[in-house]
Image (tube, helix red, strand yellow):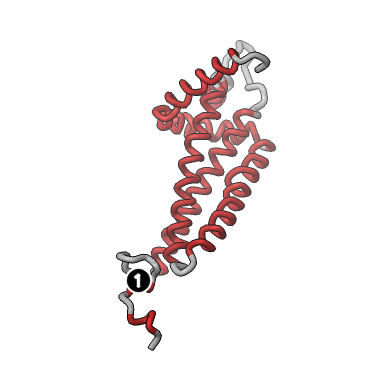
Amino acid sequence: MNPADRRPQEERNGYPGVPRRPIVVFDALVVAVVLVVLVAVSALLSGTEAALLGFPRPRRREDGAPVDDRVARVDRLLEHPQKIILTVTVATTALNVAAAVLAAGLAFQTFPGAPGAVVGVVVAAGSLVLLTFAQVLPKAVASHHAEGWSLAAAGPFNAIVAITRGGLVPAAIVARELNVLIRIIPGAS
């Protein structure tokens, strides 16, 4: 018998004090579904940002009023583009960090013997997936369908703006102060 096999289970894992719990297929499927949902929501937010900021001139009636309520919602969002950018930044960062943590946890549980290699592979694969499917692809699609995407997403996006407002207030204060500081520095724009 191999001397390493006589050690307690938690020492054979490489994690002293942490018993090895075999990965259950159901657990992995739940984590995979949650990861897909996190990436999808991040993609929707990124696409919404691109669509809103690339929204064509809103359609108006002859009296200057918006054509419908959806156009009015987009108008209200476009009055403060910094809210769009800050909301998407805060929300996608939270979603992407949650996805990375879940992916790393699943990888560590699946491959407990090689944590260094697993972290490298998970970071590389996760970065590629997030960059492709949560940033580039949705922004490309949304930029080609800016009006339709904006009109469809304006209502739910207003709700997300309201939810993330607590995180946006400190971010807006820091951004404002940095802007003041940059104006003070000679040669800065």
Position of 59 with respect to 116 (left or right) is: right
x 55%, y 29%: residue: 85
Q: Residue furthest bottom?
A: 1
The percent position of residue 164, horizontal first and vertical second, equals 43, 31
Residue that carries the numbered disc 1 in the rendered image: 11
The image quarter containing residue 123 is bottom right
Q: Tag 1: residue type?
A: Glu
The percent position of residue 153, horizontal first and vertical second, equals 53, 34
The percent position of residue 55, horizontal first and vertical second, equals 64, 28
The image quarter containing residue 147 is top right
x 47%, y 26%: residue: 171
x 40%, y 66%: residue: 26
Position of 103 with respect to 133 (left or right) is: left
Residue 178 versus residue 40 in the image, above or below:
above
The percent position of residue 38, horizontal first and vertical second, equals 48, 48
Which quarter of the rendered picture does the C terminus lie within?
A: top right
The image quarter containing residue 53 is top right
x 33%, y 66%: residue: 16
